[in-house]
Image (cartoon, rainbow, N blue to C red):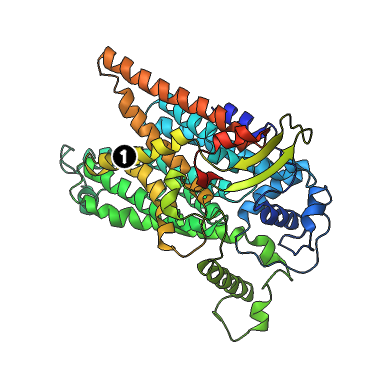
Amino acid sequence: MAVLGGVLRFVRLGEPGSLVFDETYYVKDAYSLLQSGYEREWPENANDSFNAGQPGILLDSPEYVVHPPAGKWMIAFGMALFGSDNAFGWRFGAALAGTLTVLFVGLIAARLFSSAALGAVAGLLLAVDGHHLVHSRTSLLDVFLTFWVVAAFGALLLDRRDGRLRLARRLARLYGSPGTAGGPPGTVPAPRGALLYGPWLLWRPWRLVAGACLGLAVGTKWSALAFVAVFGLMTVLWDVSARRVAGIPGWEGALFRDGIPAFLTIIPTAALVYLATWTGWLRSEDAYDRQWAAQNPDEGWSWLPASLRSLAEYHRSAYAFHNGLSSEHSYSSTAWTWLFMGRPTSFFYEGSSAGEDGCLADSCSTAVTSVGNPLIWWGAALALVVVLFYWIGRRDWRAGAVLSGVAAGYLPWFAYPERTTFFFYAVSFEPFLVLALVYVLGLVLGRRSDSLPRRRAGLLVVGCFVAGAVLLSAFFMPVWTAETIPYSDWRLRMWMPSWI
C-alpha cells in the first residue's frame, strides 16, 4: 500500500508548477533556511520570480515567522536534492513524508488489530484519501506534523509491547526468585516494595524515540503540544493496566514507578529535540529578534543565556500572534464542521477556455481541493461513535488509543472559537480517523472463531466498502491532483455548495 501511496503522491508532483496556497510562505522560508539557516524577507512579487525558477532574490533583512523551523527544513531537504527552481524539488519532502505515513499507518494497524489484512486496509484507505493526498502533494507544514505524530504513536505502541514483556520477565524473576513464595528457604527475599508495586522499568528506548518524534512534531507546529500531553498520559495508563492485569497488588504504583520515568524520558527528550530545530536561528547573529536580549538587558528571564532569552521572547510574541488571529478568510471553517467536510480548503483553482492549457471543452477547470473521500470521512465520523462505545463499555485499550489521537488533534481547536481555522488542520488526526474506521471494519469482518457464513458476510461488506472507497477516490482524483477537466465535470464533484 505504501507503493500505491507513493505512486499517487509522486506522479505529476510538479503540477501545478507554481506556488499554491500557503506554499508562498513555507517553500520560500525553506529556501531561506537553506541559504542562511534562518528566514529572511522577500521583495514584493517574489512569487513570480520563484515560479519562474529564479529564487535567488532574498533580501538581507530577517523575516518574522510564527511557526518553528522543523517542517520547513523537511521541505528544504527536497530542495537540496532536486533543486529550488522546480515544484518537484520543493514538494518532494511532503510527498516522502506522506508516503511514509501511509506505510506507518498500515504497520500500526496491523499491530494494533493483530491483522495484516486490516493493516493493508488502513494503509490503502489513507493512501487513496484526497485530504491526505493533497497535503502530500503540496508543501504545507501539516503533512510533516502528521508524519511525526504517527511516528510517535507507533513508537509508543512498540514501547507498550516491550514494556509488558520486560515486566513479565522481571515479575518472573521476583516471584520465582529465592526467598519468595515458592523459592528455596533460607535465601534473601525480594524487596517488599517490588512485590507490592512491581519492579521499576527504567530503560524504555522506544519512549526516547517517541519523545524525539514529538519534539520534531512541536518543532513543526505548536499544535503538537496536545499530542505530547495526551500520548504521555496514554502510555502511563497502559503501564497502569499492565500492572493491574499482572496481578500486582499495588498497581496504582505505576503512576509513580512508570509515570515519573515516562515524564523524565519523553518531555526532556522532546524539549531538547525541539530546541535543536532552532539551531540555525541560534547560530545566527541577525535572525529576527536574535539580539533582543542584548537590546533589552533588564527584561525577560535574566538567568537564561542571552540567546535563549531572545528565543523565549520570540516565542512569546509568536504565541500572542496565534492567540489573536481572527482575520476573515473565504475558506475558514470552524472545528465542528471538519468531520463532515463542511468547508474544504481550495489550494488552487484556475479556469481555462477551449484550446488553453489542454482544455478540450468550452470551459475547463484545474483545481487542487482538500476535500476528502466522502465514504472514508463520513464513515469514520460514524465509526467514532462505535469506537467510543467499545472504549467506555468494553474497556478496549485499542479503542482508547485510537481516540487519543483524535482527541489530541481535534478537541483543542474547540477552545479557540474566535480564531481563523481551516479544515486542512484536520490532517493531523486523519490517520486516527482511518484507524477508527478500520476498527469498525474489523468488527464487521468478525473473529476467526466465527462461523464461515458470518465471516463470508463480513468479508463481503468490508470488500464492498473498500472497493467503493477506491472507486470514489478515482472519481475525485482530478480535483486532488490539478488535472484539467471540463467545468461541468468539476461541478459534478462539488457535492455541496460549501465545497466551491
In the picture, the quarter occupied by the N terminus is top right
Q: Is residue 341 left or right of residue 394?
A: right
Q: Quadrant of residue 39?
A: bottom right
Considering every residue shown, the one lying at the far bottom of the view is 298
- Is residue 317 in sight in this rendering? yes
Residue 431 screen position, x and y as percent? 46, 40
At 66% from the left and 61% from the top, the residue drawn is: 279
Above or below 368: residue 124 = above
Residue at the disc numbered 1: 387
Q: Quadrant of residue 38?
A: bottom right
Residue 113 screen position, x and y as percent? 36, 31
- As rendered, which of 389 and 481 lies closer to the eye? 481
Above or below 356: residue 310 = below
- As rendered, which of 166 and 184 lies closer to the eye? 166
- As rendered, which of 455 and 418 lies closer to the eye? 418
Q: How many marks?
A: 1
In the picture, the quarter occupied by the C terminus is top right
Residue 115 screen position, x and y as percent? 39, 26
Query: Within 10 angstroms of label 1, few (less than 14), some, or many (20 or more) residues?
Result: many
- Is residue 269 in sight in this rendering? no
Q: Is residue 431 left or right of residue 273?
A: left
Above or below 366: residue 302 = below
Q: Is residue 385 left or right of residue 314?
A: left
The secondary structure type at the circle numbered 1 is: helix
At 73% from the left and 68% from the top, the residue drawn is: 62
Residue 84 screen position, x and y as percent? 78, 47
Under mark 1, the amino acid is Val
At 74% from the left and 43% from the top, the residue drawn is: 87
Considering every residue shown, the one lying at the far front of the view is 362
